[in-house]
Amino acid sequence: MIHVENLTKYYNAFCAVDHISLDIHKGEILGLLGPNGAGKTTTLRMLTGYFMPTSGTIRVKDHTIDENPLEIKKLIGYLPESAPLYHNMLVYDYLDYIARIRGLDRNQKSARIRFLADTCGLNSVMHFPINDLSKGLRQRVGLAHAMMSDPEILVLDEPTSGLDPNQIVEIRDIIRQIGKEKTVILSTHILREAEATCDRVVIINQGKIVADDLTENLKKSAGKERVIHISLLNADRNAVEAQLMTIDGIIGIEPRADADGGKLDIRLTCQPAADMRENIYKAIKKTDWILIEFYQETKDLETVFRELTKEN
């Protein structure tokens, strides 16, 4: 669907995007993540034809950005971080205006506005001035604007920025619904939203791609070791260390007794290749220790993000 090769953008001597390459497939929701100044917005603006790259290639279907920018723009709906709305207009009048700009005839216009009002949850505010709406509702109006021409690709720059938790969930649900039929590319700082919404994640740091994979694969591949936590009663610290360190695959143990010495909390570091939980449980079962907690530490996307974007 979209092929990007060696995409580079300079602002004078500053390299904002540094020779990135990726393929975006039809029907996937791609999350573009990165710290402030990483190059996310610049990348999205080049994909939409708003900026021309300094060098590199962008191909959307059979069109290249340097030869057919207008054809590419026809395939893409773009919602920038601050939705470009006319705040003194009623929601219906604004969407009607956008439909006419997009060249929809009378029948197409009415049907499309009804569809977008349903999809974006705007039916109850269609005759309200945009200025009277909450930021979440204004964001929905911007989303309806971006979708007016029924584009095959939807590009969303920080679509949930500044929204409250309820509004974030509402926008996330709309994006998921849209993603069933369209290719969606979104940038976000809210990593839990990317984890909950995106099929695939690309992480950019200092203008370069540092990770590109399915969300679940990124979480599984992060870090070099497995970490398991257990809590025991009726257990002696030295005996626990001696017993558990005999298990192949355990490479470190950090026991810590609570204040009254009744409970022993243990952090086990294990080799990444194998799941050690069964062997650990069998070793504990042979003793008279009481196991009250046992879980393997899982890494969320936020942890992966920090590992990949922290400064050297």
Image (spheres, rainbow, N blue to C red):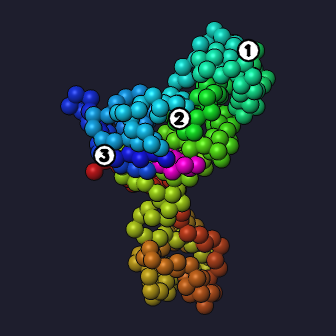
Give me the residue at 72% from left, 34% from top. 119
The one of 54 and 74 positioned closer to us in this rendering: 74
Label 1 crowd (10 A; few <14 / some 14-19 / many >=20):
some
Residue visible at 52% across and 41% down in the picture: 185
Foreground label between 1 and 2: 2
Quadrant in which residue 135 is drawn:
top right
Whether the magenta-drawn stretch holds residue 29 is answered as yes
Asked if residue 161 shows in the view, the reply is no
Res 75 label: 2
Residue depicted at 32% across the width and 34% down the height = 53
The magenta-colored residue range is 24-33
Q: The residue tagged with tag 2: helix, strand or loop?
A: helix
Q: Which mark is first along the chain, 3 or 2? A: 3
Residue 128 bears which disc, if any? 1
* Secondary structure category for the residue under label 3: strand
Report the side of 12 relative to 127 (left or right).
left
Q: Is residue 168 visible?
A: yes
